[in-house]
Image (cartoon, rainbow, N blue to C red):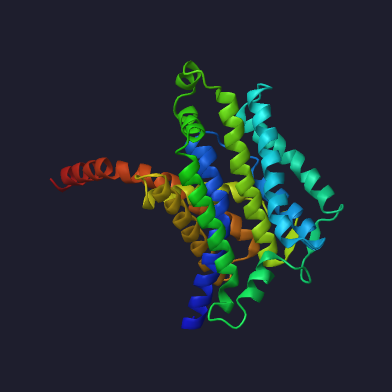
Amino acid sequence: MDFGSILNLGQTALELGLISALTVLALFLSYSMLNVCDLSTDGCFTLGATVGAVVAISGHPYLSIAAAMAAGLLSGFITAILQTKMGIDSLLAGIIVNTALYSINIAVMGNSSLLNMNKTETVFTKMAGALKGTPFAGQFKLLVALIAVVLVIVFLSVFLKTKLGLAIRATGNNPDMVRSSSINPAFTTVIGLCIANAFTGLSGCLLAQSQKSVNIDIGTGMVTIALASLLIGGAFVSKGKIPMKAIGVVIGAIVFRLVYAIALRFHLPASMLKLVSSVIVIIAISGPYLKSRYPMLKRRLDHRFGKEAE
């Protein structure tokens, strides 16, 4: 592999990492802050991609961003209502919404499983036109993704310090205490999931416009990727204020995509890529536990082999 190929590999991983980082930031809000594991992420990601693609194809590239986020917000609202008002377990609610969204996404795509956007004006083509003739002309995808990630990090940093944001964080830590403080945990859960899924919809929209196509399986496995990236990011930045933690999860998303890109360079069959994702998740989840157990395991091995030596 020559130097040019390495640079291209790194840039692709960085672009995809930043786009998927928006979904990771969504789980940072719902999973880390609100303590809700939202399994509707795959379907919501695809919903954002399909809605954004349809609106962009109709000639409204900027409106497609708002439409995708609004669709994600609505998905989050339904998931939250199932949990808070209908007594359905959070995991089951996510599965139900994710299943329903498959049919909805097919309907949004006009009963097709694929949309082609090769001749469609998108936010990326707009940025490419704006940067034409400048030294950054080849970095238009990276700049769009970077701007989106920075805006989301700034929003989370400010929002989570507000009264409502602090109530959402408190709901994740101790809902009983929140309830005793005259704050409705159902309301904070709804707001948190709506915002988180809006970010997921934005992530799906940007990925679809970046690769200029949408298929019905574009969001498959996103919850796995996002959770792995979240845990990897936690290994880099486990302490600190909200902005630092958010930057940490973005780094986790980039690292995950870099490992994924390297796996592709080894010409692994497409059918094996899900296995690669699963292995990365296992390492990310079990790594801290195995690290904490290592001293005890080392003592046991030293004790056993020490006796055998005697």
Picture layout, residue 175 above or below residue 268: above
| Residue 3: image location, x then y, percent | 46, 82
- Which residue appears at 71% of the width and 39% of the height? 74
Q: Nearer the viewer, residue 32 or 113?
A: 32
Residue 46 seen in the figure:
no
| Residue 303: image location, x then y, percent | 19, 42
Q: Nearer the viewer, residue 234 or 51?
A: 51
Outermost left residue:
310
Total numbered badges shown on the rendered structure: 0
Quadrant in the picture for residue 94: top right
Quadrant in the picture for residue 40: top right
Picture layout, residue 286 above or below residue 256: above
In this rendering, position of residue 194 left or right of residue 265: right
| Residue 150: image location, x then y, percent | 50, 56
The C terminus appears in which quarter of the rendering?
A: top left
In this rendering, position of residue 97 left or right of residue 13: right
In this rendering, position of residue 59 left or right of residue 280: right
Q: Nearer the viewer, residue 167 or 296?
A: 167
Quadrant in the picture for residue 30: top right
- Which residue appears at 56% of the width and 81% of the height? 134
Outermost top residue:
180
- Which residue appears at 58% of the width and 59% of the height? 19
- Which residue appears at 49% of the width and 51% of the height? 153
Residue 173 seen in the figure:
yes
| Residue 288: image location, x then y, percent | 37, 45
